[in-house]
Image (spheres, coloured by chain):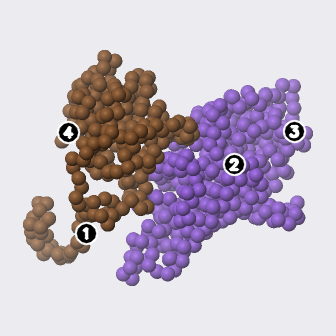
Amino acid sequence: MKIAVCINHVPDTETKIKVAPDNISIDRTGVNYMLSPYDEFALEEALRLRERFKGEVTAVSLGGDPHRDTLRKALAMGVDRALLLKEDGERDSFGVASGLAEELKTMSPDIVLFGKQSIDYDNAQVGTLVAALLGIPSVSVVVRMEVRDDGTVSCDREIEGGHETVQTKLPAVFTAQKGLNEPRYPSLKGIMAAKNKPIEAKPAAAVPARVVTVLMRRPPAKTPGRVVGTDKSAVPELIRLLHEEAKVI
Amino acid sequence: MPKFQGVDYFRMDGLLSGEEIMVRDTVREFVDDRIIPVIERHNRAGTFPMELIPTMAQLGLLGATLPPEYGCAGMNNVAYGLVMQELERGDSGIRSFASVQSALVMYPIFSFGSESQKRAWLPLLASGEKIGCFGLTEPDFGSNPGGMLTRARETVDGYLLNGAKMWITNGTIADVAVIWAKLEGVIRGFLVERGTPGFTAPEMKGKHSLRASVTSELILQDVHVPKENILPGGDGLRLPLSCLSQARYGIAWGANGAAMACYDAALQYAKTRIQFGKPIAAFQLTQEKLVFMVSEITKGQLLCLQLGRMKDAGTVRFAQISLAKRNNVQQALEIARLARTILGANGILDEYPVMRHAANLESVLTYEGTHEMHTLIVGEDLTGLPAFV
């Protein structure tokens, strides 16, 4: 079985984001990067599928040289190949999806896995766009997947207020939600082995931008709370504020 | 409390390789996810978190520097040190478990064991299926292990061991003990398996320190072990002392990890605790304490890193390891105590990690060579004049 996992390199969840002076990008100084958390579920699922069906797992990332760190982590977790599609600039979701799809066409994997979204721009588009560009089915926000020997796949996906079970046929794209599995830690042995595995790199296919960022801003600062009273005489005013200002009741 | 981000005031990460950083970050995540959420419960109950062993083994934390042919990761000593640093940021008891298994059980079997002993034990110890302990210290022989009373006598088909060991980490949970005993007056190492008639390992209770670690006595009454259980690769006090050098190396890193946990807790607390209308971090006396902590942690980090590089190059001397263990544990204890003063009364609660680290470090100060013995080891190294024999 040929499995591709598309992974992204994103600012650490603990980062305090600052907007850069150009007002359309973030200030990258002192920012630590990590493998996007939902992509970890995708990677883990890929490794489990390989353990069951044999075959090869390729991790693909589109971006600049720093993405090598995240590909290195994927190698340490146990993927067979790592491929960097080089792009030093920014791309919109369609641009990323097109670059990935171009490569996946030649790779023709049976299964393509993504995290349900990258936790930096939160567009949650790339996996689905890749499926469309490849002309294959996509199942998103997957919390359980069962691949059968006949190439059919049964998935549980999260929907508002519950789960739905869907079925599709390979090849297909799946985007992983938290709960799909418990990702493994890269082992020290895996880290050592990854040191000697190459990261292949080639330029990502060029695609003109369709969506451009024109402004990035931080949310307005929170206003301090206020005390409307200290005994039961404050209750009517509190109710009025919750109803009219906070609009929560 | 916000996630621990590491203490790296002097950009030491720039001196580490990509693999070393990945090892450190992986263990850091494991400690945050698995150790910190359960450690206070185990510390209160006085139990070792056995449930962590399979994941620690799967990560490759046991015997991490030994070669892959025995099921180990073949890491360098700097990566191993970073593992110890992160584990002890969780708890000294957890680091002690890994230290003993790696440096005091797997290392002597690897260094002094026969090929069949290595093949039999190392993969099982690396996978955590078997636990080991190290029996050197005796009730009356701590700093002076050469005076040990435990004896081995050769029999027709093996050896008969008699004696008692004390303060043995992992003793009660161990499947195999590396026992040091005198055979015709010469110290030799023996592998004694759990369940061997005459061998018992009762747990020592009532500790105020290292509560999440098992500490035991080992009692050997006419314990017969087969011939193939002697470690054939050498004799004399030099052997157990070389194991202790391995362990002390890990402690030098580990103590700095405990110090980082205390500093981090103190810094977070000082920034949010308001007195006289401002965070206590804004007071000069608090800042002085925080600056002291970061200064000592930074010095300790650089000391460990160079120690590790020398160990990897094969040029390290045991007195240098003594200096690092002595310095880093003393400073970590001082940092833990200072952190406690920043947290005030909150510092004594197990809602915060500080008092647990402080209590643990009291043991670390005197185990694996007391602070005083390390002083005398370095003193002798400097002057050429031994002060303790």
Circle 2 sits on which residue?
B312
- Classify mark 4: residues with Cα within 10 Å, few (<14), some (14-19) or many (20+): few
**Left or right of A56: which side holds B135?**
right
Label 4 – label 1 distance at C-alpha: 33 Å
Q: Real-space Cα distance between discs 4 and 3?
A: 72 Å
Seen in the picture, residue A135 relative to A224 is either above or below; the reply is: above
Disc 4 and disc 1 on one polypeptide chain: yes
Chain coloured purple: which letter? Answer: B
Q: Quadrant of the C terminus of chain B?
A: bottom right
Q: Nearer the viewer, mark 4 or mark 1?
A: 1
Q: Closer to the camera, B362 or A155?
A: A155
Residue type highlighted by circle 3: Leu
Label 1 Cα crowd, 10 Å radius (few <14 / some 14-19 / many 20+): few
Q: Are marks 1 and 3 in contact (CB under 8 Å)?
A: no
Please tell me whether mark 4 or mark 3 is closer to you in this view. 4
**In the rendered image, the vertical position of residue B347 relative to residue B218, given as above or below:** below
Q: Is residue B345 visible?
A: no
Provide the residue designation for mark 1.
A221
Direction from residue B224 to residue B252 in the image, left or right: left
Q: How many neighbours does mark 3 have within 10 angstroms: few (below 14), some (14-19), or many (20 or more)?
A: some
The three-letter code of the residue at mark 4 reads Ile
Instruction: Residue A203 in the image: state x and y as whole percent.
Output: 39, 41
From the image, state whether disc 1 or disc 3 is nearer to you. Answer: 1
Gap between marks 1 and 2 measured at Cα: 51 Å
Which residue has dot 4 on it? Answer: A159
Contact between marks 4 and 2 (CB within 8 A): the answer is no
Query: Color of chain A here?
Result: brown
Under circle 3, the secondary element is strand
* Secondary element type, mark 1: loop
Q: According to the image, label 3 marks what residue?
A: B183
